[in-house]
Image (tube, rainbow, N blue to C red):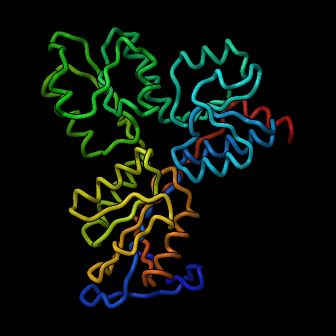
Amino acid sequence: MFGYYKIKNKERACQSYLIPESNPVEREVWLAYPRGFCAGVDRAIDVVEKALLLYGVPLYVHHEIVHNRHVVENLRQKGVVFVDDLDEVPEGETVIFSAHGVAPVVWEKARERNLRVIDATCPLVTKVHMEAKRYAKAGYHIILIGHKNHVEARGTQGEAPSQITIVENSEEVEKLPFTEKDKLAYLTQTTLSVEETSELIEKLRQKFPQIEGPNSSDICYATTNRQQAVAHIAPHVQLMLVIGSQNSSNSNRLKEVAERWKVKSYLIDGEEDLKAQWFTPEVYRVGLTAGASAPEILVNRVLERLNKDFGFCRVREIRLKEENVVFQLPRNLREELEKLA
């Protein structure tokens, strides 16, 4: 499905334009959909906004609520304090756990410090934690496909540190010391490349035929949808732009998806990162998407600058799927809000 727009006076007016494929005279942007915020990110940011109303400032958040510089800075300006260790939170204060989830030891520390906890963990991450606990309790060793330094993977590993091994690539799969007699299961971080993860799962199954896995994929629906949208657009553009911060796993995966199509791709925080040398005369069609933690306002700003400074006067939105997933706020936060109603 195609939507046609023209940027006009810093706004996209709903006017129809068709660009003949055989004669791309004017520069245009192919805008991916789905893009931007997923349900888990929407929920996490809403949790912080509602908690600010209830409890005021300072309000503490354990790690970045989501991995996006603009979102974090906006909340910091409102009085949110982001901490890497609960020792930085005064006893008895309110702390929000980020969308990426935390290990049980973090929950225990919060109880020891008498902190009021609001858990903004994405329900899809919680699903992986529950699977990890179930497999560990049943005596399995779990192979977690993920990034060792990512907070989500560390949080999942924390459910059973002695029974979970994180692997990032096929070389690490090959080096796993287990045998066909060992009880093994695999899980995955939610924000990985669908294609690469499938390849690693297949390698695990070849090496360990007895390995078990979850009934449904751990990779987030939004991650999958956004990667599919990029894969659809990438063969038709000369340049792909992905709006997302450098520490955003799902945004980096979007860039990698485009690069697999041999398309020059850049991960940008916003319109200020656009560089004139990218837009050579041969670049007449640019793909644009946003990671699951990037707000739509950044998309609009990038479109505005593409139009104003680089002559991309037309925008074609490529809509592959509709998303209508909504996650409820945490129960304790809902109950507090109901008291005010």
| Residue 215 can be seen in this image | no
Is residue 93 toward the left or the right of residue 302 in the image?
right
The quarter of the image holding the N terminus is bottom left
* Residue 86 visible within the image: yes
In this view, the residue in front, 33 or 75, is 75
Quadrant containing the C terminus in the rendered view: top right
Q: Quadrant of residue 145?
A: top left
Query: Residue 301 appears in which quarter of the rendering?
Result: bottom right
Q: Nearer the viewer, residue 273 or 215?
A: 273
Residue at screen point 29% across, 23% down: 143
User: How many labels sit on residues?
Assistant: 0
Residue 154: x percent and y percent?
A: 43, 26
Say if 241 sits above or below 305 in the image.
above
Question: Which residue is found at the position 44% from the left and 59% from the top?
Answer: 268
Determine whether, in the image, residue 78 is placed left or right of residue 235. Answer: right
Measuring from the top left, give residue 4's x and y in whole percent.
45, 80
178 is higher (above) or lower (below) than 40? above
From the viewer's side, name the closer residue of 271 and 277: 277
Kindly identify the residue that appears in the image at 53 percent across and 53 percent down.
37
Residue at left offset 65%, top offset 18%: 110
